[in-house]
Amino acid sequence: MSDVIYQAQPPLEFIPPAFNPLVLRFVHLFLPSWMRWKTAIADVEADKVEILVDLYRQFQDGKIRFMLAFRHPKTDDPFCLGYLLSQLVPKVARYQGTILESPIHAHFIYDRGIPLWAGSHVGWIASNLGATPIQRGKADWTGLRSARELFVNGKFPMAAAPEGGTNGLSELISPLEPGIAQLSFWCAEDLHKAQRSEQVLIVPVGIKYSYLEAPWEAIAHLLSELEAASGLPVQQSNATFESLYPRLLNVAEHLMSLMEKFYTRFYHQKLPEIKIAEGHDRNEALAHRLQAMLNIILQVPEQYFDLHPIGNLTDRCRRVEQAGWNYIFREEFKDVKTLSVVEKSLGDRIAEEANLRMWHMRLVESFVAVTVKYIQEKPTAERFAETTLLLSDMISRIKGSNPFKRPQLGKQKARITIGEPISVSERYLVYKGSRQGARQSVADLTKDLQQAMEKM
């Protein structure tokens, strides 16, 4: 995370999209080599690419506007989508004899906070690729206007992750946020007002990662590191699911006990009494403890920022994040020269404390989609590895290390699936009928998108 957030700053500036075709050409040229060099992704495959080819043909013919709503299990997802658009779509189009105007690209919507932890150069690259930022957790009208304008008039279709963030799990989707559905209805509304005939669609896109070879040896090594870091004896065992799963449970239960003691002793949080029905195993007990633990962790920043715990864990994390940004990026710091040394120092103190409170929220953010049943239902190396990596992320945050520099357990293949487009225009009459109809239409579209993505 950038050191800038330890000091009070002027409000976050909007980074306007400024598409540069030369930058895109450079990215498309070097993306395959860069992915092999910098990521664990050795191959990207895609199903039903012909759907995208047809959609881009219709888009370029002025018949439709559409949004790619993609799964977001990990930070490598945008690279895989870039590979899909720059390599696979043109390849299938050539095979079909479909003529598409180059380049094949999309205007991505990204979190404005990303350049804070990934570096300001990321904001520059995103801008030059025609991407547009939005601040999560608040009504960012500048960001929303930009996304709305691009959806209606942009050179390319849109792309966004309706989950709002990564959850680390390829086969479990987080609850979707309603912003994608709302933007789509706004696009239909703007086209209707302009008397334009384009139809508006949302296209679900699934992304699933699998290892080229089951990385049990690497998982065993990572578990040894987690055992040592958390104060457990490092166990020696076979690198098999049957041998490693008890070790994973031991690490999870031990970490849970440490965190429970930490938050009850030093943050005066009260754990609820958890009653486990007779016959339930340790997995079930761990699941109940995890949910109770995430709730009390999140109460620490909520109490500091005077926030009420309303909504699911993701909603609560978003509000904490925005409250923290409001303490760090402040209007009165637009002109630091007008502030006294004392005022500036007090502002820095508040920024530092806000950042420390947001640390608790980051712990919760990593675990909002975790369930004990994830491994039990399908005991694959992929699910085991993903869960172990989430525990590794947690320990990295506790140690103050960078959780985004994850250990690579082995080379992976990304499989992208293009879903059937969902028509927004067909729902527009109900949406524009009344405020209640609009709210219900957004909710229904979000629900249908969630179901479509879960089926994929």
Image: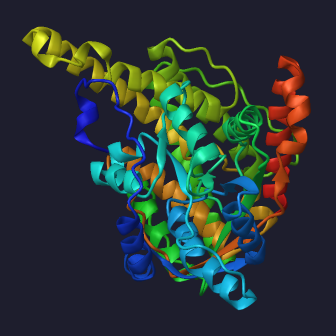
Q: Residue furthest front?
A: 195
Considering the image in quadrants, where does the C terminus appear? bottom right
Q: What is the count of numbered marks?
A: 0
Judging depth in this view, the residue of 111 and 86 nearest the camera is 86
Residue drawn at (44%, 75%) of the image: 28
Residue drawn at (75%, 36%) of the image: 185
Relative vertical location of residue 397 with respect to residue 432 in this rendering, above or below: below
Considering the image in quadrants, where does the N terminus appear? top left
Query: Percent x, y for residue 2?
Result: 27, 43
Query: Percent x, y for residue 63?
Result: 76, 57
Query: Percent x, y for residue 52?
Result: 72, 69
Residue drawn at (41%, 79%) of the image: 29
| In the displayed structure image, the side of residue 271 where residue 287 appears, left or right | right
| Scheme of colours in the image | rainbow
Relative vertical location of residue 47 with respect to residue 434 in this rendering, above or below: below
Judging depth in this view, the residue of 91 and 119 nearest the camera is 91
Image quadrant assignment for residue 46: bottom right
Query: Percent x, y for residue 298?
Result: 55, 28
Image quadrant assignment for residue 273: top right
Residue drawn at (27%, 24%) of the image: 10
Q: Residue furthest bottom?
A: 95
Let me know if residue 266 appears in the view: no
Judging depth in this view, the residue of 367 and 34 nearest the camera is 34
Let me know if residue 213 appears in the view: yes
| In the displayed structure image, the side of residue 30 where residue 62 appears, left or right | right
| In the displayed structure image, the side of residue 198 where residue 423 appears, left or right | right
Judging depth in this view, the residue of 279 and 447 nearest the camera is 447
